[in-house]
């Protein structure tokens, strides 16, 4: 394998090419909430060095985001890819870092008024919290969609239409299960550039 092909197949090159492909399919009206940006920057601030944080702030074009204000999905894409590159060494690679970003974003939502209301509905039926996830998605995103199918009393599938990689949503689902005090798993599968599924279950 020559040096050119090695460079082209490197993780950094692949991630950058994928980012450009994803950016190309996002429309100007596609937005998401500021708490997702804040969660990503907080994780980088706590786990990366000052130069890494600086690169992520530059990718986001800002360091301060208001929790439920709307910001472009393209900006979150750039920030998520930059953050995943910076954190890949700590989380077993780019995909692991992307999953951690999703894992850290969910608590920000659960701490909000809407999130607290959803948690209050759980009681002794954690299934209710999972049932509310498509509605919660609409609160966080003006982009794509989320639908839920149950495969059994403690397992199901969330289907996403979203330009953010599936590892991000797998991380979010894991955190939601944790918030419901469930010992579970979430397995993500990327079907296309914008279509993915997360199969979840708990004991």
Image: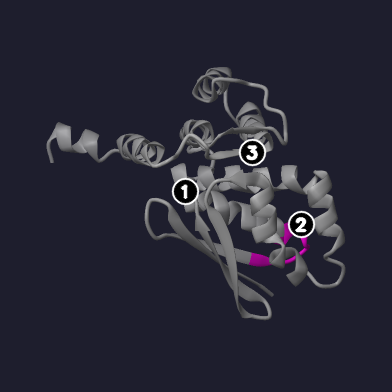
Q: Residues within 10 Å of mark 3 (few under 14, many from 20)?
A: many
Q: Which residues are magenta?
A: 177-184
Mark 2–mark 3 distance (CA, rounded to whole Å):
17 Å
> What is the quadrant of residue 120 in the picture?
bottom right
Is residue 93 something one can see in this rendering?
A: no
Q: Is residue 180 magenta?
A: yes
Is residue 73 something one can see in this rendering?
A: yes
Question: Is the residue 142 above or below the residue 175 in the image?
Answer: above
Identify residue for label 3. Answer: 36
Q: Residues within 10 Å of mark 2 (few under 14, many from 20)?
A: some
Q: Is residue 1 magenta?
A: no
Identify residue for label 1. Answer: 165
For marks 3 and 1 on the same chain, the one whose residue lies earlier in the sequence: 3
Q: Position of residue 180 (x, y in %)?
A: 77, 62
> What is the quadrant of residue 7 in the picture?
top left
Q: Position of residue 78 (x, y in %)?
A: 47, 31
Q: Which mark is residue 104?
A: none
Mark 3–mark 1 distance (CA, rounded to whole Å):
14 Å
- Give the residue drawn at x 55%, y 55%: 145
Q: Secondary structure at mark 3?
A: helix
């Amino acid at each position: 394998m020559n040096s050119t092909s090695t460079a082209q197949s490197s993780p950094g090159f692949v991630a950058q090419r994928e980012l450009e492909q994803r950016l190309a399919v996002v429309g100007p009206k596609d937005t998401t909430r500021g708490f997702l940006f804040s969660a990503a920057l907080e994780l980088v601030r706590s786990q990366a060095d000052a130069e890494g944080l600086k690169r992520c702030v530059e990718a986001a074009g800002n360091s301060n985001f208001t929790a439920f204000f709307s910001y472009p999905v393209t900006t979150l894409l750039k920030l998520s890819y930059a953050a995943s590159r910076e954190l890949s060494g700590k989380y077993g690679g780019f995909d692991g870092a992307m999953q951690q970003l999703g894992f850290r974003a969910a608590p920000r939502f659960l701490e909000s008024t809407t999130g607290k209301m959803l948690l209050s509905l759980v009681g002794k039926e954690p299934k209710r919290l999972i049932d509310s996830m498509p509605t919660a998605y609409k609160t966080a995103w003006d982009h794509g969609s989320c639908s839920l199918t149950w495969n059994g009393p403690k397992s199901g599938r969330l289907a996403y239409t979203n330009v953010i990689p599936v590892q991000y949503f797998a991380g979010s689902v894991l955190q939601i299960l944790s918030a419901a005090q469930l010992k579970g798993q979430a397995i993500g599968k990327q079907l296309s550039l914008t279509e993915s599924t997360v199969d979840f279950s708990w004991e």
